[in-house]
Image (cartoon, rainbow, N blue to C red):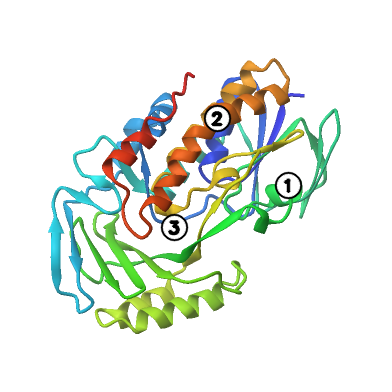
């Protein structure tokens, strides 16, 4: 049965659907949101991730919408510049690199447009139960009727529902990295012109970059903290916490706090990694952050998702209908790449990875392996 249900309509899920369709599979994507998700931080496409985008025919489009920073300033807590660079930024690395930095919602839109004609999308719904046997997986949905698929892939992020249903509670696999990250948009009230600013004050800090031809800002605010008791979907409590922390800053605290309070795309979550011994169980497998989230601290989550989607589809296509063989080969090909990239977030907590480590991570996988 060459029918595949993919949970998650962000980046990994649609890219997997694209390659599975190319290999003759029938794909369905279920996504909790009512449509492609807006907002989010800038993401980087590096190494084999660039190869995947190029093979999808999306490289030129990605290059057209990439960020075009001229450099960055590092400020002290009072807003005075203490350092600057026109060679690199913390968000994207060296500005003369072939790597592409673009907004997450731009990449989500691109991969959705590439797949919507060939993949069935079930927006505004989610999986509530999985029951698999030797012939398929019966899937119950929150709103739609139950259906049976040959395979189910969880590409539904750090807090994956598929992982919880097939493998067990999240706390078995999630490893907190000691901090939280909030991302939200605002008008460009700082009049930044293709220039980033970064500030750290004690255990909090932020990076601000202009986007959309300098008409908007994307603000990434982080703070050190052990795991918080707030439910991750309780944005009201988390938003209040972020607003209060921003308001206490000496430089632009009041305007940043107001922006966080008003932002329709407000996001906040723990910096965490998902570490698992296996990414499959029976007919169910995990992809991207659901199986091996490296955290945004690594800067490699998007490239991991892109590469993982390509490799998983390739393994399923080569396995002659034997998903056990396909999943085993998928893990063999991806495991070292995942380990190296997850290490980027732990080798230098709170700071950018070294150039040597980043180069090693980018080159740790061949798509044709």
Left or right position of 75 against 327: left
Which residue bears the numbered disc 1?
A: 167
Q: Where is residue 138 in the image (x, y as percent from the top left)?
A: 83, 40
Question: In this rendering, is residue 97 above or below 234?
Answer: above
Dot 1 falls on a residue whose secondary structure is helix
Circle nearer the N terminus (3, 2): 2
Using the image, tell me which numbered label, if any, was put on residue 39. Answer: 3
Compute the Cα span from label 3 to label 1.
Answer: 30 Å
Which one is nearer the viewer's eye here, 338 or 4?
338
Left or right position of 7 against 114: right
Question: In this rendering, is residue 315 above or below 10?
Answer: above
Between tags 2 and 1, which lies in front? 1
Using the image, tell me which numbered label, if any, was put on residue 18. Answer: 2
Compute the Cα span from label 3 to label 2.
Answer: 23 Å
Q: Where is residue 248 in the image (x, y as percent from the top left)?
A: 34, 84
Q: In which quarter of the image is the N terminus?
A: top right
Q: How crowded is mark 1: few (under 14 residues within 10 Å), some or many (20 or more)?
A: some
Which one is nearer the viewer's eye here, 256 or 143?
256
Q: Position of residue 17 (x, y in %)?
A: 59, 32
Circle nearer the N terminus (3, 1): 3
Contact between labelled residues 1 and 2, with CB atoms less than 8 Å apart: no
Q: Position of residue 252 (x, y in %)?
A: 26, 79
Compute the Cα span from label 2 to label 1.
Answer: 26 Å
Dot 3 falls on a residue whose secondary structure is loop
**Residue 144 visible in the shown view:** yes
């Amino acid at each position: 049965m060459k029918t595949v249900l993919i949970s998650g309509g962000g980046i990994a899920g649609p890219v997997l659907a694209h390659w599975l369709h190319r290999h003759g599979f029938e794909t369905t994507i279920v996504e909790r949101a009512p449509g492609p998700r807006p907002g989010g931080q800038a993401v980087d496409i590096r190494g084999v991730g660039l190869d995947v985008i190029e093979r999808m025919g999306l490289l030129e489009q990605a290059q057209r919408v990439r960020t075009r920073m001229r450099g960055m300033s590092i400020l002290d807590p009072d807003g005075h510049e203490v350092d600057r660079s026109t060679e690199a930024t913390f968000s994207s690395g060296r500005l003369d690199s072939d790597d592409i930095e673009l907004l997450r919602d731009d990449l989500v839109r691109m991969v959705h447009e590439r797949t919507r004609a060939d993949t069935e999308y079930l927006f505004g719904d989610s999986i509530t139960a999985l029951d698999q046997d030797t012939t398929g997986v019966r899937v119950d949905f929150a709103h739609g009727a139950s259906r049976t698929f040959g395979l189910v892939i969880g590409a539904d992020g750090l807090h994956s529902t598929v992982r919880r249903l097939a493998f067990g509670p999240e706390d078995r696999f999630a490893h907190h990295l000691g901090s939280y990250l909030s991302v939200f948009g605002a008008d460009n009230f700082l009049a930044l012109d293709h220039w980033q600013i970064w500030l750290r004050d004690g255990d909090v800090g932020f990076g601000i970059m202009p986007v959309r031809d300098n008409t908007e800002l994307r603000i990434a605010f982080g703070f050190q903290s052990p795991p918080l008791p707030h439910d991750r979907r309780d944005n009201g409590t988390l938003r209040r916490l972020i607003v209060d922390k921003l308001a206490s800053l000496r430089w632009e605290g009041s305007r940043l706090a107001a922006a966080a309070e008003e932002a329709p795309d407000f996001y906040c979550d723990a910096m965490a990694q998902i570490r698992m011994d296996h990414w499959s169980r029976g007919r169910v497998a995990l992809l991207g952050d659901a199986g091996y989230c490296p955290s945004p601290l690594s800067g490699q989550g998007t490239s991991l998702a892109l590469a993982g989607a390509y490799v998983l589809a390739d393994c399923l296509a080569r396995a002659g209908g034997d998903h056990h063989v396909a999943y085993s080969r998928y893990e063999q090909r991806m495991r070292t790449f995942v380990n190296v990239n997850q290490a980027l977030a732990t080798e230098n907590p709170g700071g950018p990875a070294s150039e040597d480590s980043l180069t090693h991570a980018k080159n740790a996988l061949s798509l044709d392996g």
